[in-house]
Image (tube, rainbow, N blue to C red):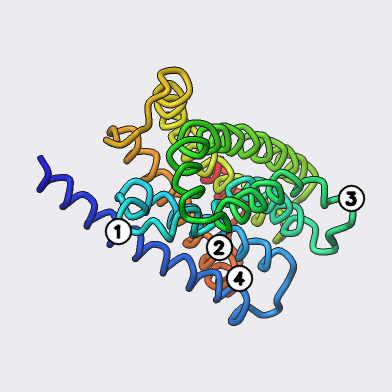
Amino acid sequence: MVLIRWYIEVFLFLLAGGIITYGLISAMGMWIMARPRTLAMRLLAWCLILLCSAIGHEALLLGGGYDKLPSLRFLPIYMTLAVGPVFFHYVKARLYPAFRMRRQDIKHFLPAVGQISAYIALWAQPEVIKDDLWNGFYRYYLHPVENLFFVITGLAYLFFAHRFIKHEMGVRKKDEGLLVALRLKRTTKVIALFLAVYAGYLVDDTVRRLLLLRAQTDMTWLSYVSFASLLGMLVWLSLFAWLNEFWWPRRHKLNFNELKKKFH
């Protein structure tokens, strides 16, 4: 059983490392290779970086990396509460090229600022205090609660993004904007599906830690399924980034009626 667990951990680290590398390369492509560098591309790049950070954290947690390297605890910083707002503003920027971030938009990122600040404060504590916080406050309360908010806020922002997309599909005719809306609609649905799968881990995590007050040392199959959903989310968004910003714009014009049937 120990040997099987070791193989799972090695496979987990290799898989996560490869997908994180792919995600970071895709994010760099949005910043460096894309022409012109629009706000939408920058927001999409940030979304990929945020997912890479979350996957790195979960890989170390599920694979036992934090137990072997206690000095890395709380790193990389878990920034999941920023994923929903960033993707929502990416959709707006992609649908409306003239869209610009305003001061009023800061309110969407306040939960993420609080999350990041909490992780920095916890990581900066002395080793003895950090060990107690990790095995108590973090594992029993902070991580389950932030996962709960990640699912709730993520699904909420995806819902509002989908509303914007549906509105644009109703008013746009056979132009490039309709094609963009159709692609965004499919991607929003796929991400919502991955997030719903991730919620399965939330149920298991919450029951075992909050209700039973038992730290999750032996990971269940739901833990690995939820981790796979994070990986799937990053892979899908990375592929979408390459296709939407590099490949599709260079193709010849397609039949919009056929595309609409295909994407519905």
On screen, residue 54 versus residue 229, left or right, reads right
Comes first in the chain, label 2 or label 4: 2
Question: Which residue is rendered at x = 57% and y = 35% of the image?
Answer: 151
Label 4 neighbourhood size at 10 Å, few (<14), some (14-19), many (20+)?
few
Comes first in the chain, label 3 or label 2: 2
Q: Are marks 3 and 2 in contact (CB under 8 Å)?
A: no
Mark 3 to mark 1: distance in Å?
A: 40 Å
Label 3 neighbourhood size at 10 Å, few (<14), some (14-19), many (20+)?
few
Mark 1, mark 2: which one is toward the viewer?
1
Label 1 neighbourhood size at 10 Å, few (<14), some (14-19), many (20+)?
some
Mark 2 to mark 4: distance in Å?
A: 24 Å
> Tag 3: residue type?
Gln
Q: Mark 2 — residue?
A: 49
Q: Mark 4 — residue?
A: 249
Mark 1 to mark 2: distance in Å?
A: 18 Å
Q: Mark 1 — residue?
A: 13
Mark 4 to mark 3: distance in Å?
A: 32 Å
Q: Residue furthest top?
A: 211
> Tag 1: residue type?
Phe
Mark 3 to mark 2: distance in Å?
A: 24 Å
Q: Mark 3 — residue?
A: 104
Is 187 drawn above or below residue 72 in the view shown?
above
For the residue labelled by badge 2, is the local secondary structure a helix, a strand or a loop?
helix
Asked if one can make out residue 182 in the rendered structure from this viewpoint, the answer is no
Estimate the x, y position of residue 85 in percent, counting from the top left.
70, 48
Estimate the x, y position of residue 133 in percent, counting from the top left.
50, 42
